[in-house]
């Protein structure tokens, strides 16, 4: 046995605990995005034990690890039964919603290799994963504006956007931004009429909407699943409202022929024949086993109860928010997502409200203006929020009171002019550094310290690596982000993309080996 030559196991785990202490909480319903909490205390331990039991198994070869094949077929079968698939329906377990959406687009493109310049038609509210798919797979994304009031996709506008290059139409159940379900039956009819596939992105709603519809609990959502004629594929994430550990999603197809296009095989090399149903080759069995264990343990009746609980919390939170002067909820949410916006011109801004909520231990996600959708706060409500609605609403009222006292965030004319002058296609490191400085996010020195040519050894006296990759030391975010978010809100979507991508590069910088943690 080779002994460890680094810190002891207890010391390493203690350091991990210290690091995790600075993260947003993943339990208790205080982080209203990114995480999904059932409120059931035994699920974490069950998932962890199942994950550990299968983490070293490799999904690359199901003949070597038949347990993984068994569990995947079980999960897919459960999803098909829940989501209206017939006897011919098939599916694949993926690493998350984005991979499921990518594979749906890939299968559609490969199913129409005769189309020279393939495109997909999507509502403007569709998840950004489909734009990523277009970018990766060379598929044009034709975006169709949604109804400006309901934020639902427009079947007539969708029909008008379909042409001879269309290989896939997409609709949401529900859309992430506003929590509303698109009119799936009408869009499916349009897709069938044109002989085009329809994918339903039910990543965030697929494991909760069926139960709400079955029990007629607080939703007006129409049919949306594989039982709707014309729906050819559907994605649903188990690490969302199935409350499984990340990351596990299921991509369903109405039949195996429709699925075939996202499989990949290559025997043109001297090694093993590569055969992959997903974008990954090696796949740990851990997430799959954890999901399998949780889904079996909770069961159909358990998920029905969790769906009722989450929806009840959503309705109570929504009613409380709309009772706060200056706040409202966009659209008519069908599931468990809320988009909280300003009601009129109340004299404060949501960016300050978000900061004030964070100061009180509540974490929400900002959504910037887009088409008819104003800036808003995204709330993902889970079963763990039930019974704690008053605490959230009290924090929301206090946050609004503080935001009113602070007044709206304003940008001076010089800063607005600087943002307006930036060209996202020609953004330079110097321009980005200037904007960081204007935002109060000036870079610190490199870990290596100065050298004879300048503070970072580039010979130019500038902080950074000379390649436009930012400083050697990751930037530390300020406690309050309202000013920065106000800047991002006035930037065009393309400029915002470039700025945030550059900013991300400044965050992901390794520390020097001798740097203190």
Image: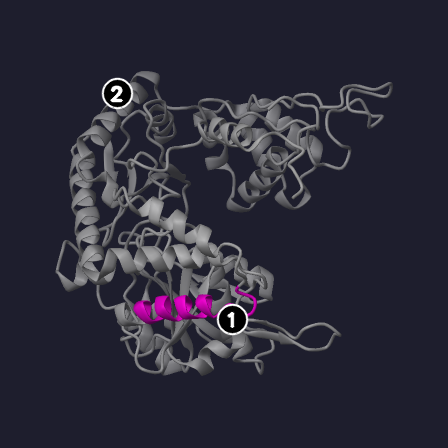
Q: Is residue 384 left or right of residue 75?
A: left
Secondary structure beneath dot 1 equals: loop
Q: Secondary structure at mark 2?
A: helix
Quick check: is 74 in the magenta stretch?
yes
- Residue 429, relative to residue 412: is it above or below? below
**Residue 14 shows in the view:** yes
| Residue that protrudes farthest toward the left in the picture | 216
* The furthest residue to the top: 405
The residue beneath circle 2 is 401
User: Residue 208 sits in which quadrant?
Assistant: bottom left
Number of the front mark, 2 or 1: 1
Q: Residue 117 appears at what percent x and percent y?
A: 59, 74
Closer to the camera, 351 or 264? 264
User: As rendered, which of 296 and 218 lies closer to the eye?
Assistant: 296
Above or below residue 246? Residue 187 is below
Taking 487 as reference, is 169 above or below it? below
Magenta extent = 59-79
302 drawn magenta: no
**Image position, residue 225 (x, y; %):** 29, 69
Query: Where is residue 405 drawn, in percent x and y?
Result: 30, 16
Cβ atoms under marks 2 and 1 closer than 8 Å: no
Name the residue rendered at 34%, 57% in the picture: 293
**Image quarter (top left, top right, bottom left or bottom right) of the N terminus:** top right
Q: Residues within 10 Å of mark 1 (few under 14, many from 20)?
A: some
40 or 303, nearer to the observer: 40
Is disc 2 surrounded by few (<14), some (14 to 19) or many (20+) residues within 10 Å? some
Q: Residue at x 45, y 70 (%)?
A: 69
Magenta segment's dominant SS is helix
- Residue under pointer 1: 62
């Amino acid at each position: 046995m080779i002994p460890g030559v680094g810190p002891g196991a207890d010391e390493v785990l203690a350091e991990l605990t210290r690091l995790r202490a600075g993260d947003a909480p993943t339990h208790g319903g205080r982080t209203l995005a990114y995480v999904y909490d059932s409120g059931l205390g035994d699920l974490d331990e069950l998932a962890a034990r199942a994950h550990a039991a299968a983490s070293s198994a490799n999904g690359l070869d199901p003949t070597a690890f038949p347990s993984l094949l068994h569990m995947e077929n079980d999960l897919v079968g459960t999803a098909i039964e829940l989501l209206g698939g017939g006897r011919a329906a098939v599916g694949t377990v993926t690493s998350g919603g984005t991979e499921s959406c990518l594979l749906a687009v890939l299968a559609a493109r490969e199913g129409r290799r005769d189309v020279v310049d393939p495109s997909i038609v999507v509502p403007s509210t569709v998840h950004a994963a489909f734009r990523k798919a277009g970018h990766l797979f060379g598929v044009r994304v034709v975006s169709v504006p949604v109804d400006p009031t309901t934020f639902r996709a427009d079947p007539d506008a969708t029909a008008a956007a379909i042409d001879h290059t269309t290989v896939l139409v997409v609709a949401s159940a529900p859309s992430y931004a506003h929590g509303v379900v698109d009119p799936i039956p009408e869009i499916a009819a349009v897709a069938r009429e044109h002989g085009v596939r329809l994918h339903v992105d039910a990543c965030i709603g697929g494991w909760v909407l069926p139960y709400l519809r079955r029990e007629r609990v607080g939703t007006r959502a129409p049919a949306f699943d594989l039982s709707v004629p014309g729906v050819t594929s559907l994605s649903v994430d188990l690490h969302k409202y199935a409350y499984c550990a990340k990351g596990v999603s299921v991509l369903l197809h109405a039949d195996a022929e429709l699925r075939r296009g996202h499989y990949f095989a290559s025997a043109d090399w001297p090694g093993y024949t590569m055969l992959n149903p997903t974008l990954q080759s090696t796949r740990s069995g851990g997430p799959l086993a954890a999901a399998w264990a949780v889904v079996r343990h909770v069961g159909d009746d358990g998920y029905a109860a969790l769906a009722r609980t989450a929806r009840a919390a959503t309705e109570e939170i929504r009613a409380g928010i709309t009772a706060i002067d200056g706040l409202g909820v966009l659209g008519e949410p069908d599931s468990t997502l809320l988009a909280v916006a300003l009601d009129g011109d109340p004299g404060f801004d949501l960016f300050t409200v978000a900061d004030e909520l964070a100061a009180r231990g509540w974490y929400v996600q900002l959504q910037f203006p887009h088409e008819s959708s104003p800036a808003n706060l995204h709330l993902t409500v889970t079963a763990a929020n039930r019974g704690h609605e008053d605490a959230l609403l009290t924090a929301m009222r206090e946050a609004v009171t503080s935001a009113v006292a602070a007044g709206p965030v304003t940008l001076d004319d010089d800063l607005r002019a600087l943002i307006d002058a930036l060209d996202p296609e020609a953004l330079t490191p110097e321009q980005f550094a200037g904007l960081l400085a204007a935002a109060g996010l000036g870079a610190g020195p490199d870990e290596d310290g100065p050298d004879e040519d300048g503070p970072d050894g580039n010979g130019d006296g500038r902080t950074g690596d000379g390649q436009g990759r930012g400083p050697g030391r990751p930037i530390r975010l300020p406690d309050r982000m309202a000013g920065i978010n106000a800047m991002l809100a006035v930037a065009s979507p393309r400029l915002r993309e470039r700025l945030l991508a550059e900013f991300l590069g400044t965050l992901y910088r390794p520390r020097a080996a001798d740097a203190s943690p």
